[in-house]
Amino acid sequence: MYFIWLILAIICIIYYAICATYAGAGSSFIFVWLILTAFFAIIFELRWLTVKGIINIPSVVTKLMIGIIIAGAICFAGLEGLIVSEMVKKPDTDCEYVIVLGCQVRGLRITKSLRKRLDKTIEYVNGIENDNSEKYITIIVSGGQGNGEDISEAQAMYDYLVQNGISKDRIIREDKSTNTEENFRFSESYIQNKSAKVGIVTNNFHIYRAKKLARAKGLENITGIPASSDNILFINYMVRESIGVIKDFICGNFRN
């Protein structure tokens, strides 16, 4: 039974190698898979030494450790369930505004994740307005300029949308925010009708946390518009998002 810890360690190191090869060793958050590898390997080593009689760990300590791990796994699974529940919801079709959350721009070039968000925005807006010619959706692109970015994320998104047929007159650039909480705090000021339905465009794994943060900033009438995410990095994104939800909860970012 104790070999399950070794199997988990092997799975984690293999997934780390895949992510590092695919996206680069410095890619966001993949270091956690090395930490998990070490964690599971240490547990396996302790269990193996105990079974072989080389060391003696009191049974109460063993049971306590296993209990903590099981409780943590159950909590993690529950949180992942909440994240998935928002991923699979269909967006409402009566939005007056759409807020597109920014993410990293490399120089002047948008990343794959950001392009997926923008393509989803174009698909949603064109689809709704083609079905109802009287609909007009204002798009707020939200994101400031960070390290390694030659322009703001808002400007990069604006340029991409205009290049792909979206009228510049309907796009509002919010270019001061540096995180999701600020995305909503600054974007909210551009929404004149506070009761209007607002769509939130971000990658699917991010919808749950994004909606929680939006409500905390006074946006109650909202719907998630989930864009797809990278298949290879999806598990990494899901684990990272769970930690992000916990962090925002502890920091009080979900409170009004």
Image (spheres, rainbow, N blue to C red):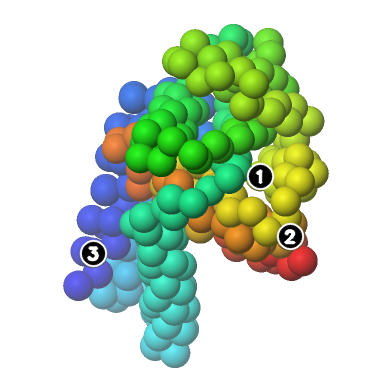
Q: Quadrant of the N terminus?
A: bottom left
The amino acid beneath tag 3 is: Ile
What residue appears at the point 29 percent right and 62 percent down from the top-left corner? Answer: 5
Q: Closest to the observer: 17 or 114?
A: 114
Q: Is residue 150 above or below residue 233?
A: above
What residue appears at the point 29 percent right and 37 percent down from the top-left corner? Answer: 231
Q: Position of residue 153 (x, y in %)?
A: 64, 23
* Residue carrying label 2: 218
Q: Position of residue 253 (x, y in %)?
A: 73, 60
* Residue carrying label 3: 4
Q: Closest to the observer: 94 or 190?
A: 94
Q: Is residue 156 above or below residue 85?
A: above
Q: Residues within 10 Å of mark 2 (few under 14, many from 20)?
A: few
Does residue 80 appear to the left or right of 181 in the view shown?
A: left
Q: Nearer the viewer, mark 1 or mark 2?
A: 2
Tell me which corner region of the image, top left, top right, bottom left or bottom right, holds residue 55. bottom left
* Residue carrying label 1: 180
The amino acid beneath tag 2 is: Gly
* Disc with the residue nearer the chain's start (2 vs 3): 3
